[in-house]
Image (tube, rainbow, N blue to C red):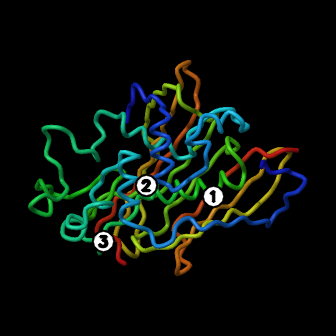
């Protein structure tokens, strides 16, 4: 399932649907697993009345975590060397996210990928990069 | 953040994988994982963030005997001049702006990590949707039971003057 350098070229893409109609319960699940219990992710009353947002919203790290799933499905288990993102827009309950890895270059046994996750309106919510070890 | 002991455990990896809706059996099934290239269960790529569970001072977790700023009978349990902060959200508080990981080795159950965080750069920017943005960076080094560096994490938090316009 590992990628082969000789079969990769710049511009190749891999896309996955990360989530359809994101549920508040999944955000709660992520809070519990990660230990980040910031009420803006799970507490509608606090988020609307104190924080001033229209509803709870996903942890950036939940979107990054699901984006990581797309990456490991593409490059294989234990192959990532680096993975970094900027959080460019908030993710809300009800959002549907798709994530794409695009090959930028292949150097010997390392592939450089551009990584982008966007919502149902095409707004980019996570933008970043990854590098992974590939077979030669 | 300083974490003296972050034991990587199979059940925690399972719960974390479930939360990011990842059904790759390498995170759940030891027998399956034996046949994979890593040769055993490994942690998903962003799992190191869950070290918050082992940080005794992590402020985004309710603690026994301490007030909590989430809602109870009232929208917030305590009065604060500005809610949220740090890596979290909140009215005019902090949001997570960037996160980067470098993997020197992929960790799995049995590894016992430590994490030490040092401050990085800070900078400011004028934002269109939320007023002045104040960025601060931190670098966390995760080391294993042998003192070997296994993950380097760099986070950037941003505090906004007011909630981000929608």
Residue located 48% across and 51% down the image: B18
Splitting the image into 4 quarters, where does residue B97 fall?
A: bottom left
Residue at image point 30% right, 33% down: B56
Query: Considering the numbered disc 1 on the image, is that residue within a helix, a strand or a loop?
Result: helix
Q: Is residue A128 above or below residue B117?
A: below
Q: Chain of mark 1?
A: A
Image coords of residue B27 (percent x, y)? 57, 42
How busy is the neighbourhood of tag 3: few (under 14 within 10 Å), some, or many (20 plus)?
some
How many residues crowd around disc 1 within 10 Å: few (fewer than 14), some, or many (20 or more)?
Answer: many
Which mark identifies residue A55? 3
Q: Describe the element under mark 2 as helix, strand or loop.
A: strand
Circles 2 and 3 on the same chain = no
Count numbered badges in the picture: 3
Q: Are marks 3 and 1 on the same chain?
A: yes
Q: Residue furthest top?
A: B146
Q: Which mark is residue B123?
A: 2
Q: Position of residue B12 (x, y in %)?
A: 45, 39
Q: Which mark is residue A35?
A: none
- Considering the image in quadrants, where does the C terminus of chain A appear? top right
Does residue A70 appear left or right of residue B82 in this picture? right
- The reply to whether dot 3 and dot 1 touch (C-beta < 8 Å) is no
For the point 52% across and 81% down, the residue is A121
Chain identity of mark 3: A
Q: Quadrant of residue A58?
A: bottom left
Q: Is residue A94 left or right of residue A75?
A: left
Q: Mark 3 falls on what kind of element?
A: loop
Name the residue: 46% across, 27% down: B114
State the CA–CA distance, disc 3 to disc 1.
Answer: 27 Å
Q: Horizontal and vertical percent for residue B92?
A: 27, 64
**Where is mark 1, residue-wise?**
A70
């Amino acid at each position: 399932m590992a990628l082969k350098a000789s079969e990769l070229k710049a511009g190749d893409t891999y896309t996955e649907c990360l989530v359809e109609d994101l549920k508040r319960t999944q955000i709660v699940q992520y809070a519990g697993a990660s230990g980040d219990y910031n009420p803006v992710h799970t507490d509608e009353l606090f988020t609307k009345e104190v924080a001033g947002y229209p509803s709870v919203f996903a942890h950036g790290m939940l979107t990054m975590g699901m984006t990581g799933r797309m990456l490991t499905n593409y490059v294989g288990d234990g192959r990532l060397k680096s993975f970094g993102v900027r959080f460019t827009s908030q993710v809300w309950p009800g959002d549907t996210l798709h994530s794409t890895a695009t090959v930028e270059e292949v150097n010997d046994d390392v592939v450089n990928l551009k990584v982008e996750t966007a919502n149902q309106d095409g707004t980019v919510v996570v933008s970043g990069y990854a590098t992974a070890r590939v077979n030669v | 953040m300083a974490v003296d002991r972050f034991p990587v455990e199979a059940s925690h990896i399972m719960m974390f994988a479930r939360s990011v809706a990842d059904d790759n059996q390498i995170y759940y099934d030891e027998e399956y994982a034996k046949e994979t290239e890593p040769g055993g269960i490994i942690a998903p790529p962003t799992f190191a963030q869950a070290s918050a569970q082992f940080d005794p001072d992590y402020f985004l977790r309710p603690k026994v005997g301490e007030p909590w700023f989430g809602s109870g009978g009232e929208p917030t349990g305590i009065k604060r001049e500005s809610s949220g902060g740090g890596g979290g959200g909140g009215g005019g508080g902090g949001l997570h702006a960037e996160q980067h990981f470098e993997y020197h080795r992929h960790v799995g159950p049995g590894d016992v990590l430590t994490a030490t965080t040092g401050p990085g750069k800070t900078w400011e920017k004028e934002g269109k949707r939320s007023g002045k943005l104040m960025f601060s960076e931190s670098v966390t080094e995760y080391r294993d039971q042998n003192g070997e560096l296994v993950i380097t994490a760099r986070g950037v938090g941003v505090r906004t003057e007011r909630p981000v316009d929608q």
